[in-house]
């Protein structure tokens, strides 16, 4: 293998994850496929992006692979099916580890060519009490799993056993992924560092007349220069009213004197850990009085919500904290009418703040893990990482809820969001993206 930026997750870290997963599977066998290559257009493919579940357990970064976890067969508890070495194919698409590499480098007990999956899968699943497989996501592998199970059921009267059910691996695996280990937190600090630096660079270059895309280029250049794979999601570089479109990624307008610029961008590291930061600042270096009033309000809501992140709090409480500060401020500014309780109860703020305040963050930007278990919101625990990202979006796209005031023109076209990545610690939280400045004085020049 030539020297490469490509990641090698520590073998002991991977083995420990697999042990914990195998232990929690009980007697069920898990089938976890890798991601396929995805067509961009014609016969051109997108850059490969591994399935995060598969990556978390294997550190193997190739398409066309399937991992089996077999607690009922301790000698072959971790089996990989992979694309075998093939000089012809590797001339076109690059190096493959093949079966030997899967064993020697990635710790598989045994590895086979992917083409043998259909033939070998029934044997490996024989004797498992259940089959853990995510239905509906893997159209190539799903029929093989169902066929193997059906065959077990057909034979059960004579063989004396068959898996009792098909179960979802997600509750086990995603509970593991939700709580980050110290090694993972270190990687998320790195994603936060690079992402925050990119935001600082973007603010330094932004000026009236530049295009949103030129600012995007500065951000993404920094990601690549720092060894990241690139953006973790489509970077949002939204001047003025474009910031009121939550998933704006066209980035094709010119920045205008007097507008704010909202940038929501974060990098994805070589080992897929992600940053997710939003900052909003005046293009010309000076807030107007309306912009400053709303900016200070979003900042107050964001800081209060970040402060609410601690063990045993919930993501719902973090959201509620932000909403309350926003509503109180909007009432004071005359953008809402009524009592705080009434407005919150009726969600009469939803034309100005229409999204939740955050999400789990990790190998996926909108990371896995439950927010609720039945009736109960999940309690925050040390190691969990979530974004805290309240905003205000003043436009006339959404109707003003009944009983609320019409919006004066002077407020329209102001879209603001402030987003940090926050890890829960033993006694509170750590802001992984604090290096991206957000105090109004730091944004003016
Ligand atoms: N950039 C995606 C998000 O903030 O959720
Ligand atoms: Mn974001
Ligand atoms: Mn986010």
Image: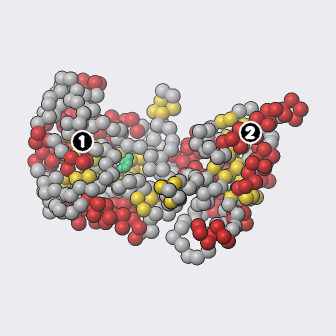
Instruction: Name which quarter of the figure residue 319 lies in.
Output: top left
Judged from this view, the residue extending furthest toward the right is 158
**Helix, strand or loop at disc 2?**
helix
Q: Measuring 79% from the left and 37% from the top, which residue is drawn there?
A: 151
In the picture provided, is 225 more to the left or to the right than 91?
left
376 relative to 96, above or below: above
Q: Position of residue 113 (x, y in %)?
A: 73, 58
Q: Residue at x 62, y 43 (%)?
A: 139
- Label 2: few (<14), some or many (≥20) within 10 Å? some
Mark sitting on residue 147: 2
Tag in front: 1 or 2: 2
Query: Tag 1's secondary structure?
Result: strand
In this image, 166 relative to 288: left or right?
A: right
Q: Are marks 1 and 2 in contact (CB under 8 Å)?
A: no
Residue 313 screen position, x and y as percent: 41, 38
Tell me if residue 422 comes above or below residue 90 in the rendering.
above
Any part of residue 120 in sight = yes
User: Mark 1 highlights which residue?
Assistant: 392
Q: Which mark is residue 444?
A: none
Q: At x 27% / y 64%, what residue is drawn?
A: 214
């Amino acid at each position: 293998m030539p020297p490469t930026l490509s990641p090698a997750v520590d073998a002991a870290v991977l083995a420990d994850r697999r042990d914990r997963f195998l232990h929690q599977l009980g007697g069920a066998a898990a089938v976890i496929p890798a991601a396929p290559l995805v067509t961009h257009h014609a016969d051109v493919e997108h850059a490969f992006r591994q399935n995060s579940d598969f990556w978390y357990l294997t550190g193997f970064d190739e398409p066309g692979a399937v991992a089996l976890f077999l607690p009922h067969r301790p000698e072959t508890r971790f089996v990989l099916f992979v694309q075998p070495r093939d000089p012809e194919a590797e001339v076109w698409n690059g190096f493959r580890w093949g079966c030997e590499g899967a064993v020697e480098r990635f710790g598989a007990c045994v590895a086979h060519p992917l083409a043998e999956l259909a033939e070998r899968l029934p044997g490996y699943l024989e004797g498992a009490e259940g089959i853990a497989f995510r239905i509906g996501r893997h159209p190539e592998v799903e029929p093989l799993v169902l066929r193997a199970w059906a065959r077990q059921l057909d034979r059960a009267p004579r063989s004396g056993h068959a898996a009792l059910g098909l179960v979802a691996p997600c509750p086990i695996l995603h509970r593991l992924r939700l709580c980050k280990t110290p090694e993972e937190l270190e990687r998320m600090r790195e994603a936060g560092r690079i992402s925050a630096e990119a935001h600082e660079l973007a603010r330094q270059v932004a000026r009236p007349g530049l295009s949103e895309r030129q600012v995007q280029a500065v951000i993404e250049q920094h990601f690549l220069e720092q060894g990241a794979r690139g953006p973790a999601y489509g970077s949002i570089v939204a001047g003025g009213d474009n910031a009121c479109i939550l998933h704006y990624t066209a980035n094709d307008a010119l920045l205008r004197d007097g507008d704010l610029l909202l940038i929501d961008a974060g990098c994805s590291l070589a080992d897929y850990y992600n940053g997710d930061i939003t900052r909003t600042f005046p293009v010309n270096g000076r807030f107007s009085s309306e912009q400053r009033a709303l900016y200070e309000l979003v900042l107050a809501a964001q800081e209060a919500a970040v402060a609410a992140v601690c063990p045993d709090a919930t993501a719902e409480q973090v959201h509620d904290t932000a909403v309350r500060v926003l509503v109180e401020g909007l009432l004071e500014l005359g953008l809402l009418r009524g009592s705080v309780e009434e407005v919150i109860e009726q969600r009469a703020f939803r034309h100005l703040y229409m999204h939740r305040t955050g999400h789990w963050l990790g190998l996926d930007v909108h990371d896995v893990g439950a927010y609720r278990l039945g009736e109960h919101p999940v309690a925050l625990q040390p190691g969990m990482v979530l974004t805290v990202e309240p905003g205000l979006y003043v436009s006339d796209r959404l109707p003003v809820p009944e009983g609320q005031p019409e919006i004066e023109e002077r407020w329209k076209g102001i879209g603001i969001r402030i987003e940090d990545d926050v890890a829960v610690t033993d006694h509170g939280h750590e802001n992984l993206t604090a290096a991206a400045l957000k105090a109004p004085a730091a944004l003016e020049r």
